[in-house]
Amino acid sequence: MNVLLKELQAYHHEVAIKITQINELLRQLRHGSNDCSPLFKMLEALHGDAERHHHENEELIRLALLATDAPIHQRVKDIERDHQAFGRIAGQLKMLEDTTQETRVIADTIDDFIKKYYDHMDAEENIFFPVADKWLSDNQWQEIKRQWH
């Protein structure tokens, strides 16, 4: 597998570790904790510059792939929309932090985000990355690397 795809996978692994920690904080919230601040702090880690750069890098690959004759699965076409949705969800989560919503509402919203995020990573790793690895040429990978964040 191309080294850039391996870098994206490594990032996914790091995110999965953070999500495991978020899930533990959600469990605590559901079992009586009223302190949401550690949870929101962990969520911020999923919406910072590293996340934005990660999605920008995936877009470089996706756009290069669309320029090939590769058969493009609908999930690959949806990746850009997913990335935009995650930005909107980050804004919604930030608004939740600033309100006095019930902890159940906060937990359910975060659960929904996590499910969508895992589904997104699964589609990238099992559909998008293998197709990109197969169809992109060395020259295309060099051009992607030149623009890489």
Image (spheres, rainbow, N blue to C red):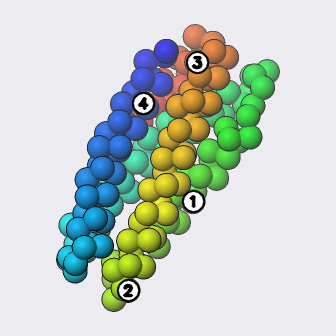
Tell me the distance, in whole angstroms, between the alpha carbons under discs 2 and 4: 35 Å
Residue labelled with disc 4: 9
**Residue drawn at (59%, 22%) of the image:** 130
**Type of amino acid under label 1:** Ala
- Disc 2 marks a residue whose amino acid type is Gln
Which numbered dot is residue 134? none
Q: CA distance from mark 2 to mark 1?
A: 22 Å
**Image disc number at residue 133:** 3
Q: What residue would you read off at disc 1?
A: 85
Which residue type does callout 4 highlight?
A: Gln
Q: Position of residue 133 (x, y in %)?
A: 58, 18
Q: Nearer the viewer, mark 2 or mark 1?
A: 2
Q: Position of residue 25 (x, y in %)?
A: 25, 63
**Three-letter amino acid code at disc 3?**
Asp
Image point (52%, 31%), residue name = 125
Placement of 111 over or under 97, stated as above or below: above
- Disc 4 on helix, strand or loop? helix
Is residue 44 among what the camera can see? no
The mark lying in front, picked from 3 and 2, is 2
Looking at the image, do the residues carrying marks 1 and 4 touch, with CB atoms under 8 Å apart? no
Dot 3: element: helix
Residue 101 visible at all: yes
- State the residue lying farthest toward the top: 138
Name the N-terminal-most of marks 2 and 1: 1
